[in-house]
Image: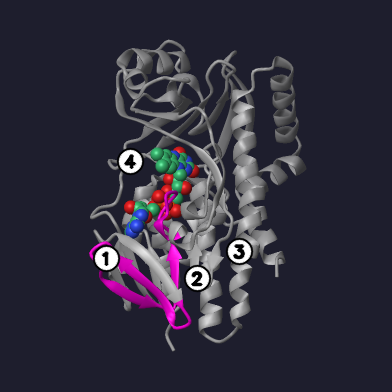
């Protein structure tokens, strides 16, 4: 019998989960609370391991055409404006067909995915439909929308983001902590690459104020830069968004260039949290509903897409009778520890490396980065970890 799968949330993870499940012959209903895709600046880096998955779903070519290919990433010492180390994905040429990242805004993946879903059989996308409750018994999982419509599924996947209603319905704890400082994102048309010589993914360590600087294409494909900064303690939205504060931050970063072309200002709270459980019975959590992290390293969305692919394959094996129901537990056995080891640990270490204030510790970080970049074996190992290639391989080892 064809399995019926309800997916809550049409963010990037929900859309990928829907396509992956539909391609495996499941009947999919995708619920999205909003009537339109959220275009606010969020994740933008898609790593080689995730590109392989998008290729498997037939999405890569179009996705890549909407973004820019970034082969390198760099670490800079912001205090002296000097390059510390550069990493080159080409070192992974023998390990992946895609030795680069694609910098493309996450709403482009959602839009592309929704277009594909609209042409797939046995798929229903319900925009503007907020899910209010999920309950389950031996017969199935029952989804109730805010307008009290009810739908019965064999399985439900909660891809409804960090504040997940599905996770709350399951009464699953979201363990971890919230960083005291908020993150400020400024998007500008100023071209940092021409002015400063940095590459489209640059991490700038600075004891006074670190920056995660990267280029995206924008909807017009003309290119723009996003700079992520820590907001100061007690800095209000108005203060952070004021022209004076924006000019100070971007001016300091750009060596005094006057940056007037700011196209977007955003500020948000950042958490490191992992759901205590990724599955209860017929209901699963994936993406930000299961785990959230700071954006330094660009790992959250990538890990969510990996969840979606793992879950689609697991449900397919069980629904098609190739495996028994006990395989469903493997999803959590694989995805939860790998998120902690590869996403939580790396993003916390990345943030600490950028914000370190102790000169000796800063110097030790820089020395280690230089040593790693200079040694081909260490360089490749480092990239296998940052690109999540290693975590995909580790997943296969967990029975
Ligand atoms: C402001 C901000 C900036 C970020 N910046 C970065 C970054 O620079 N780099 C990075 O790697 N990551 C970043 N992230 C994290 C990244 O955006 C997420 O990891 C990614 O969006 C996860 O995708 P998702 O599909 O799991 O969840 P989401 O993208 O949050 O999608 C969840 C979807 O579920 C829908 N939904 C919610 N509740 C319901 C309901 N009850 N019923 C139906 N639908 C529902 C929502 O409307 C939404 O469309 C950022 C996150 C935020 C909030």
The residue under label 2 is: 312
Along the viewing direction, whichever of 232 and 219 lies nearer the viewer:
232
**Quadrant showing the N terminus:** bottom left
Alpha carbons under labels 3 and 2: distance apart: 13 Å
Alpha carbons under labels 3 and 1: distance apart: 28 Å
**Quadrant showing the C terminus:** bottom right
Going from N to C along the chain, the mark reached first, 3 or 4, is 4
> CB atoms at circles 4 and 2 under 8 Å apart?
no
Alpha carbons under labels 1 and 4: distance apart: 21 Å
Q: Residue 332 carries which label?
A: 3
Image coordinates of residue 50 in percent, x first then y, are 52, 55
Q: Is residue 235 above or below residue 173?
A: above
> CB atoms at circles 3 and 4 under 8 Å apart?
no
> CB atoms at circles 3 and 2 under 8 Å apart?
no
The residue under label 1 is: 126
- Confirm or reject: label 4 Cβ below 8 Å from ligand 1: yes
């Amino acid at each position: 019998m064809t399995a019926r799968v309800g997916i809550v949330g049409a963010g990037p993870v929900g859309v990928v989960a829907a396509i992956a499940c539909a391609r495996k012959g499941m009947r999919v209903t995708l619920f999205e609370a909003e009537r339109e895709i959220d275009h606010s600046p969020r994740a933008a880096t898609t790593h080689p391991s995730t590109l392989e998955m998008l290729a498997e779903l037939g999405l890569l070519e179009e996705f890549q055409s909407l973004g820019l290919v970034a082969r390198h990433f760099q670490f800079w010492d912001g205090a002296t404006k000097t390059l510390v180390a550069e990493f080159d994905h080409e070192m992974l040429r023998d390990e992946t067909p895609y030795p680069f990242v694609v910098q493309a805004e996450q709403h482009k993946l959602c839009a592309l995915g929704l277009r594909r879903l609209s042409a797939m059989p046995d798929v229903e996308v319900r925009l503007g439909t907020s899910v209010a409750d999920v309950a389950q018994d031996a017969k199935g999982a029952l989804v109730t929308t805010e307008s009290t419509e009810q739908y019965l599924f064999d399985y439900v996947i909660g891809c409804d983001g960090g504040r997940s209603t599905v996770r709350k319905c399951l009464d699953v704890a979201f363990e971890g902590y919230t960083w005291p400082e908020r993150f400020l994102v400024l998007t500008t048309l100023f071209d940092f690459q021409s002015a400063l010589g940095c590459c489209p993914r640059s991490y700038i360590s600075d004891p006074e104020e670190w920056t995660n600087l990267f280029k995206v294409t924008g909807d017009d494909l003309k290119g723009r830069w996003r700079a992520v900064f820590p907001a100061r303690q007690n800095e209000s939205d108005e203060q952070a968004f004021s022209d004076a504060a924006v000019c100070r931050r971007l001016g300091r970063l750009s060596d005094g260039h006057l940056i007037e072309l700011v196209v977007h200002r955003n500020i948000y709270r950042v958490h490191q949290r992992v759901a205590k459980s990724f599955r209860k019975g017929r209901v699963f959590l994936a993406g930000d509903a299961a785990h959230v992290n700071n954006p330094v390293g660009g790992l959250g969305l990538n890990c969510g897409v990996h969840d979606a692919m793992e879950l689609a394959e697991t449900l397919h094996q069980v629904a098609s009778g190739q495996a028994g129901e006990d395989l469903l537990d493997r999803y959590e056995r694989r995805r939860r520890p790998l998120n902690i080891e590869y996403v939580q640990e790396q993003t916390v270490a990345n943030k600490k490396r950028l914000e370190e204030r102790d000169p000796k510790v800063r110097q030790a970080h820089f020395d280690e980065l230089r040593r790693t970049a200079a040694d081909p074996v260490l360089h490749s190992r480092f990239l296998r970890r940052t690109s999540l290639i290693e975590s995909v391989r580790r997943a296969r080892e967990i029975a």
